[in-house]
Amino acid sequence: MGWENLTSVSEFFLLGLSKQPEQQEVLFGLFLSMYLVTMMGNFLIILAIITDAQLHTPMYFFLANLSLADSCFVSTTVPKMLANIWTQNQVISYAGCLSQLYFFMLFVMLEACLLVVMAYDRYVAICHPLHYIVVMRPELCVLLVSASWIMNALHSLLHTLLMNSLSFCANHEIPHFFYDINPFLSLSCTDPFINELVIFTIGGLVGLVCVLCLTISYAYIFSTILKIPSVQGKRKAFSTCSSHLSVVSLFFGTSFCVYFSPPSTRSAETDTVASVMYTVVTPMLNPFIYSLRNRDINSSLRKLIRGKVTFPTITVTLVTWIPTHSVFDTGLPMSVKPPS
């Protein structure tokens, strides 16, 4: 197609989840409730971890970062969708599209990396409990989280710059409730081969590395748990990673359905439903999954609600912790004491 047929696009139209007017109020109420629950749940998790010295451990340090990523992740898509429903205006500017794409890619990949880091933390705690304090030292934990932020910020910037190089013509309607890569590429008048190549090479490589790390970590974890002689010990050890495994299955299962399923089996409707699952439902469920069966979190939340909390310096509580638990409640039949 010649360059003379290409036009400069300043705005697009997000078609949302439904075109039926009678469903708009229901969708607005539903997603507003889910958004508020998500923000409140993750905020309480972060506040509980900051204010309770018993939670200043690597596992909860990573969980606080995951809750922060979840809050930012859901805030990149849902507020704009709610604003569109409320104002009955589906327009989003081109600059807004690129900004939403950047932060969406940043936080979705950040969540994947943090889940991998948390799996490594559980691997060390269960498979090498005697070396846990030495291996999961504060410097390494901060390095892992910082590297995840920096790597994914650059990765998101690459996708955003490549998307900005495309040209668009007649159709400006995006059959989605947020600016996602796959629906947007279908509107391009220029050949999106480079974009698709980057998605399936770099994105696929990152996804493959994450899945391999998760698989290897849990293979060693399950192997170690099976060697524990007592049934109660096995149950306690498995309970320390069951919440994480549930979140991993939900997040990676739905996201892989969107980005790596065969084109012949995909449709705009199925992609939208799967996107709702991993962009809205998963961040909402994470605080409940991690708190319902976690006695430490439940105890901290009760103290928080009753007002029996102190507020130490955030820079200290996020970077340092004092390991005083026996193998951080992994359930293994041995006790580890910090070196004097």
Image (tube, rainbow, N blue to C red):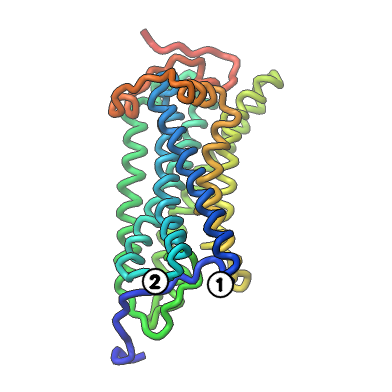
Left or right, 218 with reference to 311: right
Rendered residue at 59%/31% (across/down): 292
Q: Is residue 212 in view?
A: no
Number of other residues with Cα within 10 Å of mark 2, as a class: few under 14, some 14 to 19, many 20 or more: some
Q: Nearer the viewer, residue 137 or 320?
A: 320
Q: Amino acid at mark 1?
A: Lys
Label 1–label 2 contact, CB within 8 A: no
Helix, strand or loop under label 2: strand
Q: Position of residue 136 (x, y in %)?
A: 40, 27
Q: Pointer 2: what residue?
A: 91
Q: Is residue 245 in view?
A: yes
Number of other residues with Cα within 10 Å of mark 1, as a class: few under 14, some 14 to 19, many 20 or more: few
Q: How many marks?
A: 2
Rendered residue at 33%/65% (across/down): 96
Rendered residue at 54%/66% (across/down): 17
Instruction: Give the label on residue 175, or none.
Output: none
Left or right, 20 with reference to 53: right
Q: Considering the image in quadrants, where does the N terminus appear? A: bottom left
Left or right, 228 with reference to 116: right
Q: Is residue 336 above or below residue 113?
A: above
| Marks 1 and 2, the one that precedes in the sequence | 1
Q: Nearer the viewer, residue 220 or 117?
A: 117
Q: Position of residue 113 (x, y in %)?
A: 43, 45
Helix, strand or loop under label 1: loop
Q: Amino acid at mark 2?
A: Val
Q: Position of residue 142 (x, y in %)?
A: 33, 33
Q: Considering the image in quadrants, where does the C terminus appear? A: top left
Q: Position of residue 147 (x, y in %)?
A: 33, 43
| Mark 1 and mark 2: Cα distance apart in space | 14 Å
Query: Hey, which residue is sitting farthest top in the picture?
Result: 340
Q: Pointer 1: what residue?
A: 19
Rendered residue at 42%/27% (across/down): 49
